[in-house]
Image: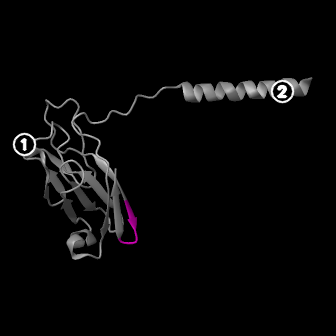
């Protein structure tokens, strides 16, 4: 009888534990309301001259035909690469909201917002932004010199 009681107590504790873990709600992830969810996948071969800038730390390129208004790929450390949506995330996309690369920054000509290509962070938020939004990050994997960017 003691074994049955112990098993029942164990099962009861497991169920209680699962209930507590699964029952705790986290705030849902808030997707940027200005940027649509675009699905794509692109491979970049770093040995091609077209992508030569990515062979250097701090190098970046703009790829115009994926994402919403394009994607900016940035070489962070020589082996770590980052991919960002090239649309300003702090307003509805319009003709001036395509980001331009300026060294290690991306700039929006609408409000002159500047974003770090190393972190995606908005560097000069205005007081009217509530909340200020950082760049939209895309997944990127490095397969021995072939970069796969996807969303």
Q: Position of residue 78 (x, y in %)?
A: 32, 68
Residue drawn at (58%, 29%) of the image? 21
**Which span is picked out in magenta?**
141-145
Horizontal relation, residue 75 to residue 123: left or right: right
Marks 2 and 1 in Cβ contact (< 8 Å): no
Of the 4 image quadrants, the one containing the N terminus is top right
Q: Is residue 139 left or right of residue 13?
A: left
Res. 97 image quadrant: top left
- Give the answer, above or below, for where 52 lies relative to 141: below
Examine the residues drawn in magenta and state their main secondary structure: strand
From the image, tell me which residue sits under label 2: 6
Residue 110 visible, this orientation: yes
10 Å neighbourhood of mark 2: few (<14), some, or many (≥20)?
A: few
Q: Position of residue 23 (x, y in %)?
A: 55, 25
Q: What residue do we see at 40% from left, 30% from top?
A: 28
Label 2 element class: helix
Lower position in the chain sequence, tag 2 or tag 1: 2
Q: Which mark is residue 110?
A: 1
The span from disc 2 to disc 1 (Cα, nearest Å) is: 67 Å
User: How many numbered circles does the render carry?
Assistant: 2
Q: Is residue 87 left or right of residue 109?
A: right
Residue 112 is at least partly visible in this image: no
Q: Residue furthest right?
A: 1
The residue tagged with tag 1: helix, strand or loop?
loop
- The tag on residue 16 is none
Tell whether position 132 is magenta.
no
Which mark is in front, 2 or 1? 1
Instruction: Tell me how the rendering is colored.
Output: one colour
Q: Name the residue: 8% across, 41% down.
A: 111
Q: Residues within 10 Å of mark 1 (few under 14, many from 20)?
A: some
Rendering coords of residue 90 (x, y %): 18, 38
């Amino acid at each position: 009888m003691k074994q049955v009681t112990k098993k029942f107590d164990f099962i009861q504790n497991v169920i209680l534990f699962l209930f507590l873990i699964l029952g705790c709600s986290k705030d849902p992830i808030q997707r940027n309301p200005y940027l649509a969810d675009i699905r794509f996948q692109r491979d970049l071969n770093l040995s091609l001259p077209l992508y030569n800038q990515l062979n250097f730390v701090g190098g970046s390129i703009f790829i115009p035909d994926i994402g919403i208004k394009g994607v900016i790929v940035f070489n962070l450390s020589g082996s770590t690469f980052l991919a960002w949506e090239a649309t300003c995330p702090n307003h509805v996309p319009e003709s001036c909201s395509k980001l331009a690369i300026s060294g290690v920054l991306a700039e929006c000509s609408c409000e002159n917002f500047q974003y770090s290509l190393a972190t995606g962070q908005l560097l000069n938020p205005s007081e009217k932004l509530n909340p200020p939004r950082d760049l939209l990050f895309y997944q990127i994997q490095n397969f021995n010199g072939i970069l796969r960017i996807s969303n």
